[in-house]
Image (spheres, rainbow, N blue to C red):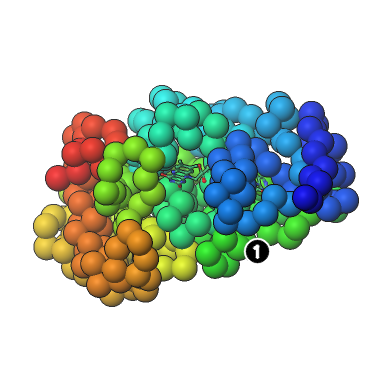
Amino acid sequence: MTTVSFVSATSVDDALAAIAAGARPVAGGTDLVVGARQGKAPLPERIVAIDRIGDLAGISELDGALRLGALATHAEIAAHPLVRGRFTALADASAIVGSHATRAHGTLGGNLMNASPAMEAGGPLMCFDATVLLQSSRGSRRLAVSDLCSGPGTTVAHEDELLVAVDVPAPGDGTGSAYVRLQHRRQMEIAVVGATAAVTLAEGAVSSARVAITALAPTVRRVPAAEDALVGTDGGADAAAAAAAAAAAASAPISDVRASDRYRRAMAEVITRRAIAAAVARARGGDAPIPASDGGAP
Ligand SMILES: Cc1cc2nc3c(=O)[nH]c(=O)nc-3n(C[C@H](O)[C@H](O)[C@H](O)COP(=O)(O)OP(=O)(O)OC[C@H]3O[C@@H](n4cnc5c(N)ncnc54)[C@H](O)[C@@H]3O)c2cc1C
């Protein structure tokens, strides 16, 4: 039996020292530990728990922008008033992760660094132009969330880097956003297909648009062609259909136990259309319920 060395850090410096010496960080453990129990991958030989590091916790606000600590849980994010009010797609996504227990323990940092193509937080954060702050004992650097993942389960972060925070700039006035996923059941599920839309309306026309697809490619990704199809339009049904067709065309889905690639590509169009419709409705001041996947999406 392999012995696992486990330490619990109470400061970022202690965690970085342990990581530099070869330990792997664990936050909520809902990917790393649960995956090991399920036989997906053995536990790393050295682990440093980061869940007691106060500097990595919490959600703060400055002039409408958000700073989400790496340890912010999905439950905390989904309940945060500013997230629910202005970063609604992120609230939609955080509110449907796993189950109550998963949302209470699973962290934003773990979600991003686990780099699943089906991760819930990625699409909304990309559409809000969020960045991650990575720190190591060599220094720190900032990366766009869009540039973080390099493939299923892999990121461009170096092995000695800790994700310490996610920064999300304030969206422009008149912005509405939504994340919608196709799910076989409400709890204990990950996305079969997901889509995020964020649109800004000025004098009735879409002045800026972001669209991202989830579980439809090796990484969550934005779809510039879908965004272009929305800008300058009224954001109505025809524009949403054109953007959704572009999202489906940009998808490269796999077949697995949840769905075939053909079904996923077909659903990409439906789910993207719903995400755009919900985002436009919210940008117009409509009060679509959170999460949009539960029927808030038209
Ligand atoms: C039953 C169940 C249902 C789930 N449902 C969903 C779902 O609906 N949607 C979804 O997106 N996910 C889902 N998940 C996956 C998981 O809960 C989330 O990805 C969660 O956010 C992972 O966070 P964590 O803190 O538990 O990560 P951990 O398991 O602690 O870590 C995950 C990975 O990230 C690394 N890591 C963690 N924190 C950091 C950091 N700050 N810096 C650098 N590396 C770090 C770890 O080394 C590890 O490689 C589910 C999991 C379970 C068990």
Q: Quadrant of ligand 1?
A: top right
Asked if residue 122 shows in the view, the reply is: yes
> In which quarter of the view is residue 295 placed?
top left
Residue at the extreme front: 1
In the rendered image of this protein, does residue 53 appear above or below residue 145?
above
Q: Nearer the viewer, residue 10 or 8?
A: 8
Q: Position of residue 77 (x, y in %)?
A: 47, 32
Q: Position of residue 130 (x, y in %)?
A: 52, 49
- The total of numbered circles placed on residues is 1
Q: Nearer the viewer, residue 243 or 248?
A: 248
| Relative side of 183 to 91, left or right | left
User: Please, what secondary structure does the residue beneath circle 1 have?
Assistant: loop
Q: In this figure, which residue is indicated by the disc labeled 1?
A: 156
Q: Position of residue 72 (x, y in %)?
A: 56, 33
In the rendered image of this protein, does residue 69 appear above or below residue 238?
above
Q: Position of residue 158 (x, y in %)?
A: 74, 60
Q: Residue at x 79, y 51 (%)?
A: 2
Asked if residue 211 shows in the view, the reply is: no
Q: Residue at x 11, y 57 (%)?
A: 237
Amino acid type, mark 1 = Val
Q: Residue at x 23, y 32 (%)?
A: 289
| Relative side of 195 to 125, left or right | left
Q: Residue at x 57, y 67 (%)?
A: 150
Q: The C terminus is located in which quarter? A: top left
The reply to whether the residue tagged 1 has its Cβ within 8 angstroms of ligand 1 is: no
* Mark 1 residue crowding within 10 angstroms, few (<14) / some (14–19) / many (20+): few
| Relative side of 20 to 237, left or right | right
> In which quarter of the view is residue 249 placed?
bottom left
